[in-house]
Image (spheres, rainbow, N blue to C red):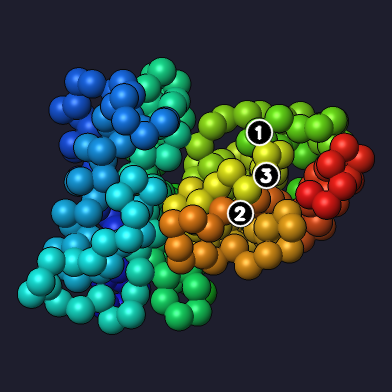
Amino acid sequence: MDGDALLAVLGEAATAVSDALTSTDDWGLTGGKPGLYRSDLVADEAALSVLHRVGLPVLSEESGLSAPAAGASSGGGLLAVVDPLDGSTNASRRIPWFATSLCVLDELGPLAATVLNLVSGARFTALRGGGAFRDGEPISTSGCGKLSRGVVGVSGYPKRYLGWKQFRALGAVALDLCAVADGTLDGYVDCAYDAHGGWDYLAGMLVCSEAGGTVVDALGRELTVRTHDARRTPVAGATDELCRALAAARRSAYEESSPGL
């Protein structure tokens, strides 16, 4: 599949999730795996039905690694990394910041991405080398380079004040990174430690990068992961300068209290 075909499939999968959740009455916990909501399972089933039909293997937060059904066309070495419902705690509490996040990887890394805001309907898309878009319109970051001027999205609890102008803890990494991409936020920093799988950030990372932003791991590791147990600590900035400043501030705060992190 070429890039446009991939985006069409990801768009169809995101729409399938939205439609399935519209008719879902129970957004509570399953009582099984900690933190697993019934809405997560509904969203997962909807996304996989589309992605498997076109022959894509899937790495999902909820169902792990799965192959397409026998007889489906080959995915051509591609892998779809999916968070069917990013921000599921927000969703369960009706806090209006949650999304479906889908990213297709090839041998070089993130190739195509779609993040659908399941509250507003805003749809963020990106192809590697092709720019980033919100509802079909090109987007770019704020261009902010100074941490002291930045409004920064935060996940986890910071060890101390990191030098930003203001911060927001919103609760859905995919949307937080897209907010950096379109200039709503200037940066994003994970103040926890290895709390996020690739499904949380890969789609948002591609959108943010294609919009002119920079996304790194706080510990300097490769962010493109392909296994269910891999965890990373993403940091993003509207510019390289801001991203470096955020990563350095986080590193300094952790070194003061927990050397080695």
User: In the rendered structure, which disc, 2 or 1, sits on the residue that comes first in sequence?
Assistant: 1
Quarter of the figure with residue 67: bottom left
Quarter of the figure with residue 137: bottom left
The secondary element bearing badge 3 is classed as loop
Q: Is residue 26 left or right of residue 104?
A: left
Q: Is residue 93 left or right of residue 162?
A: left
Residue drawn where x is 31% and y is 24% of the image = 31
Q: Quadrant of the N terminus?
A: bottom left
Pointer 3: what residue? 193
* Crowd around label 2: few <14 · some 14–19 · many ≥20 (10 Å): many
User: In the rendered structure, which disc, 2 or 3, sits on the residue that comes first in sequence?
Assistant: 3
Residue drawn where x is 25% and y is 38% of the image = 41
Q: Are marks 2 and 1 in contact (CB under 8 Å)?
A: no
- Let me know if residue 137 appears in the view: no
The secondary element bearing badge 1 is classed as loop
Q: Is 4 drawn above or below residue 196 in the view shown?
A: below
Q: Amino acid at mark 2?
A: Arg
Pointer 1: what residue? 156
Pointer 2: what residue? 232
Q: Which residue is most to the left? A: 71
Query: Horizontal and vertical percent for residue 115?
Result: 41, 49
Q: CA distance from mark 2 to mark 3?
A: 8 Å
- Let me know if residue 106 appears in the view: yes
Residue drawn where x is 18% and y is 57% of the image = 50
The secondary element bearing badge 2 is classed as loop
Query: Horizontal and vertical percent for residue 208?
Result: 57, 56
* Crowd around label 1: few <14 · some 14–19 · many ≥20 (10 Å): few
Q: Is 89 drawn above or below residue 205 in the view shown?
A: above
Q: Amino acid at mark 1?
A: Gly
User: In the rendered structure, which disc, 3 or 1, sits on the residue that comes first in sequence?
Assistant: 1
